[in-house]
Each structure stands twice: as structure tokens, then as C-alpha cells.
Image: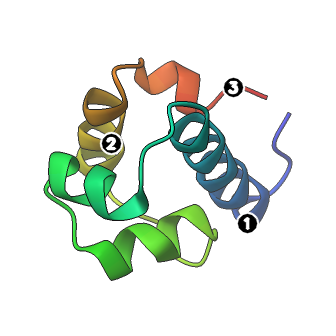
Amino acid sequence: MYHTKENLIKGVGKNIRRIREGKKLSIEYLASQASIDYSQLIRIENGKINTSIYNVYMIAQALEVTVCDLFAL
């Protein structure tokens, strides 16, 4: 379980990166498909920013996974 806000943000970012890399997608491609700025997606994956629910939804759609998959432990 995520015990702090920071751990949740970092955990979601790690899951995004893990899924993206597992699908062999570049960060540039995912950012384009999710309609998110490339530099913002880098910060999301690195757990540096707390992004919006809408951005999490758009990333999940672009990765063809559920939002729940991005929050998996």
C-alpha cells in the first residue's frame, strides 16, 4: 500500500514507465498519444509532479490499460 502522497506519485510514475517500456514505446510516442507534453510525461514517470486525474486517464488510454493498472502495487 502507498503510505504517503509521495510514494503514490512515485509508484504511479514507475508503473507508467514499466508498462511503456514493456510495450516498447518511446516516451515521445506515449506523450503524443496521450496529448501530454513530453517534458511533463518525464516528470510524471520520475514521480516529480502530481498530475491530474485526466492526464492519468489519457496515459492509460494511450497504453491500452486501465487506470487501475497504473495504481497497481
Counting residues from the N terminus, which is met first, the one under dot 2 or under dot 1? 1
In the rendered view, does 44 fall on the left or right side of 60? right
Residue under pointer 3: 72
Q: Amino acid at mark 1?
A: Glu
The quarter of the rendered structure image containing the N terminus is top right
Mark 3 and mark 1: Cα distance apart in space: 15 Å
Q: Which colouring convention does the figure follow?
A: rainbow
- Which comes before the other along the chain, label 3 or label 2? 2
Q: Residue at x 69, y 25 (%)?
A: 72
Asked if residue 64 is positioned above or below residue 24 in the image, the reply reads above
- At label 1, counting other C-alpha atoms closer than 10 Å, the crowd grade (few under 14, some 14-19, many 20 or more) is few
Q: Amino acid at mark 2?
A: Ile
**Front: mark 3 or 2:** 2
Q: Are marks 3 and 1 in contact (CB under 8 Å)?
A: no
In the image, what residue type sits under mark 3?
A: Ala
**Residue 20 picture location, percent across and down:** 51, 41
Label 3 or label 1, whichever comes before in sequence order:
1
Q: Residue furthest front?
A: 24
Q: Quadrant of residue 56?
A: top left
The label nearer to you, 2 versus 1, is 2
Query: On the picture, is 54 further left or further right than 52?
Result: left
Horizontal and vertical percent for residue 29?
A: 27, 54
Question: Mark 1 = which residue?
Answer: 6
Residue 55 is situated, as x and y percent measured from the top left of the image, at 28, 51
Give the distance between the C-alpha atoms of the residues marked 2 and 1, in whole angstroms.
19 Å
